[in-house]
Image (cartoon, rainbow, N blue to C red):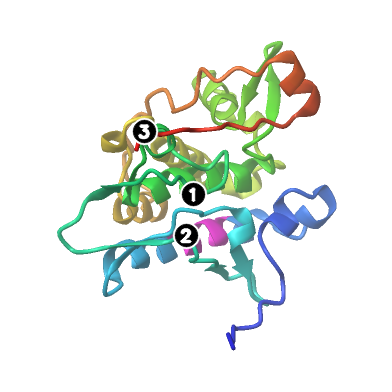
């Protein structure tokens, strides 16, 4: 028998992808959830007895208690790393489409930066209320969520992507988007570790490096995919 803490407010996806329920999460609560999830990943990567890479971090795997504290759920796909391991390779790719970084999807290389990439996607979903697997119109072109966020960021129009007006949380939201774009960079070396992510999120006057063009930027949907708004990617790796 498995006994869990009761989480009154279900999972994060229950709120952020619903216009009505999403109104219950003001910016203070959304930023609190982002920070709490980052702290949870930092513990798994740095402070747990063994380094744990979750491999399936997504909105439906973040549960919320009565005061909206986030708890990371579902470690059925997690991989344990020994202290001398930086990454591992596998021919069995697990995870959810839209949250998997390119080096894992196409080469089977898993590391703590796998979770960092997924966390960057999660930040964008929390800030925008948009799903990573869908496509969004900007300048008469359709983009996936990563590319959509990147285009608006580069054009200085990031305010157009947020769920509702920033109010007095303008700087905090801008910083979160900046950190998210650093987390979803194509190269693992360019992505920050979670300890650096937590520091960047919580240090107001800290200067952040400029992000480079993110992963999957050139993934363009076909007409059929746009109409269905659903894409399935099949990946076969050599054994």
Q: Measuring from the top left, give residue 118's x and y in whole percent.
A: 48, 46
Of pointers 2 and 1, the one earlier in the residue sequence:
2
Q: CA distance from mark 3 to mark 1?
A: 16 Å
Task: Say whether residue 36 is magenta.
Answer: yes
The residue under label 3 is 238
Secondary structure under tag 2 reads loop
Of pointers 3 and 1, the one earlier in the residue sequence:
1
Of pointers 2 and 3, the one earlier in the residue sequence:
2
Region of the chain picked out in magenta, as a range: 31-38
Callout in the foreground (3, 1): 3
Q: Residues within 10 Å of mark 3 (few under 14, many from 20)?
A: few
Quadrant housing residue 157: top right
**Looking at the image, do the residues carrying marks 2 and 1 touch, with CB atoms under 8 Å apart?**
yes
Q: Residues within 10 Å of mark 1 (few under 14, many from 20)?
A: some
Q: CA distance from mark 2 to mark 1?
A: 7 Å
Q: Measuring from the top left, give residue 207's x and y in whole percent.
A: 31, 39
Task: Say whether residue 41 is magenta.
Answer: no
Say the numbered circle drawn on residue 94: 1
């Amino acid at each position: 028998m498995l006994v869990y803490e009761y989480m009154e407010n279900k999972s994060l996806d229950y709120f952020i992808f619903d216009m009505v329920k999403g109104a219950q999460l003001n910016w203070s609560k959304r930023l609190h959830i982002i920070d709490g999830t980052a702290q949870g990943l930092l513990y798994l990567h740095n402070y747990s007895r063994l380094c744990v890479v979750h491999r399936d971090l997504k909105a439906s795997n973040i549960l919320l208690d009565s005061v909206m504290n986030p708890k990371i759920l579902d470690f059925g796909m997690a991989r344990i790393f020994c202290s001398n391991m930086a990454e591992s390779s596998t021919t069995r790719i697990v995870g959810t489409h839209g949250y998997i970084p390119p080096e894992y999807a196409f080469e089977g290389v898993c590391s703590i930066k796998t979770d960092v990439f997924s966390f960057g996607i999660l930040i964008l979903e929390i800030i925008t209320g948009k799903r990573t697997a869908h496509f969004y119109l900007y300048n008469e072109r359709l983009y996936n969520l990563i590319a959509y966020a990147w285009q608006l960021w580069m054009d200085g129009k990031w305010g157009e992507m947020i769920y509702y007006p920033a109010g007095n949380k303008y700087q905090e939201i801008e910083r979160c988007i900046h950190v998210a774009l650093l987390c979803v960079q194509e190269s693992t070396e360019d992505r920050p570790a979670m300890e650096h992510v937590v520091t960047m999120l919580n240090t107001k006057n800290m200067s952040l490096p400029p992000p480079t063009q993110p992963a999957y930027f050139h993934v363009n949907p076909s007409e059929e995919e746009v109409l269905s708004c659903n894409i399935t990617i099949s990946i076969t790796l050599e054994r």
